[in-house]
Image (spheres, grey):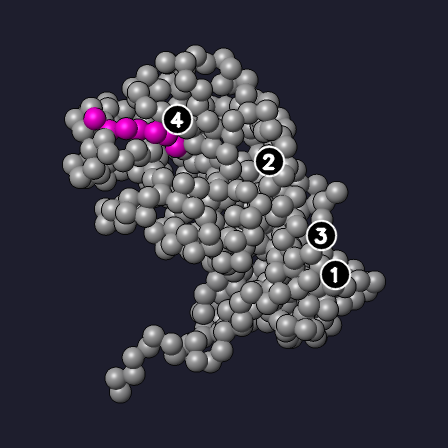
Amino acid sequence: MSQHLSPDYLSKLATDFGTPLYVYHAEKIKEQYEKLTTAFKNSNTVFFYACKALTNINILKYICSIGANVDCSSINEVKLALHAGFPNTRILYTSNGIAFSEIEEAVSLGVIINIDSISNLEKFGAKYGNTYPVGLRLRPNIMAGGNLKISTGHDKSKFGIPVDQINLIADVVNKYDLRISDLHIHTGSEIKDVEVFVKGIEVLFSLIPHFRHLEFIDLGGGFKVPYKEGDVSTDIDLLAEKVQEAFASHAIPGGKPLQVWFEPGKFLVSECGYLVTQVNVIKETNAATFVSVNSGFNHLIRPMFYDSYHHIVNISNPNGAERKYAVVGNICETDTFAWDRTLNEVREGDLLLFYNAGAYGFEMSSNFNSRYKPAEVMVINGEAHLIRKRDQFEDLLRNQIEVL
Ligand code: LLP
């Protein structure tokens, strides 16, 4: 049974904690994680939560407690993961365009590292040789993902070392006798078609003969979740079946079985999250009836940045007559959350609830217009916990040095 927090309960949280408010439902994260582990129970597969989606320390601790590993995209995420209690053997640092000093720091912390440039691989070889195993982030030249901004594996993407440079990679690996432990790809976000992952496996298997120490194949994240009515998610059972089939049909040189890794972000935390906002102003115009909520792209940028759809519900007037509205924010930019959206009649003061706000919601928020970031609440076993205070005025001045 899919778990959702009820609109009545979310209204109560809005009264208790104020708005705008991010709310996360812990058990929903567990439900999503268990969908993955159940589907892959007969295979040697490990899931690393791509924590860039949501790094509140309580979310990290919870995900650690349910048994998932963690994938990080900066050295600070690595440090947060350690702080949350993940042992370094369960932390993966998949880097992209980083300074070599961060790789040195990651080595000193003993975490697993995927390197994404020949330049850093060369520096890594010169410093560590075969003393520290390392993975390679590759660009498989596969187009995938919900839209171009979130497609990362195609042939014009900055991410990973292009697979056509395999000879250059092999030269560095041989020169320093590197122990390459895994080959990684991440082709994009919101990938519905499981064949994309099969294609990725084909590409990686064609490269395996170049490496003697492989233990893992890392297929990245990108599982799709439903955002609107009628949307389907990636079929995880079918994915498990196809991945197992693809592995069974390839002989692995040396016969050693390879573990499969995935790095889901959205799949684990998108649906667990809600953003509760309150209507400030209603403005009737010739173009639309604008509903301005006490939020904007400073809190949830996905609709403006990726044209993403977020389901919105007026939880204060569930039986009101349906009308079309333009839902906008209150910052000095065209921060349209939804245009021509049907909602139950909206009145000033009503609460509008945004769904799928767990992944890349709070995490991509800012203090633009010197507005406060929202508070965050986590509901665990039916109990609501404040896990981040709303900003206060002092936070806007923190770190500023007044020289005048
Ligand atoms: N692994 C790597 C190396 C990644 O770069 C990403 C996401 C993931 C895993 C997790 O992908 P997911 O399972 O969450 O789709 N901010 C955008 C999504 C950008 C994803 C960036 N990388 C959005 O809100 O749609």
Specify which label sits upstream in the sequence, 1 or 4. 1
> What kind of element bears circle 4?
loop
Q: First in sequence, mark 4 or 2: give its number.
A: 2
Across and down, in percent, residue 360 comes to 51, 53
What type of secondary structure mainly makes up the magenta span? Answer: strand
Mark 1 residue type = Pro
- Crowd tier of the residue under label 4, counting other residues whose Cα lies within 10 Å: few below 14, some 14–19, many 20 or above: some
Amino acid type, residue under disc 2 in the picture: Leu
All told, the count of numbered labels is 4
Q: Earlier in the sequence, mark 3 or mark 4?
A: 3
Rounded to the nearest angstrom, the CA distance separating label 1 from label 2 is 27 Å
Q: Does the CB distance between marks 4 and 2 fall below 8 Å?
A: no
Residue type for callout 3: His
- Closest to the observer, 308 or 76: 76
Label 3–label 2 contact, CB within 8 A: no
Identify the residue at horizontal 50%, vertical 34% (top origin): 46
Residue pointed to by mark 4: 215
Q: Earlier in the sequence, mark 3 or mark 2?
A: 3
Can residue 177 be seen at all in this image of the molecule?
yes
Q: Amino acid at mark 4?
A: Glu
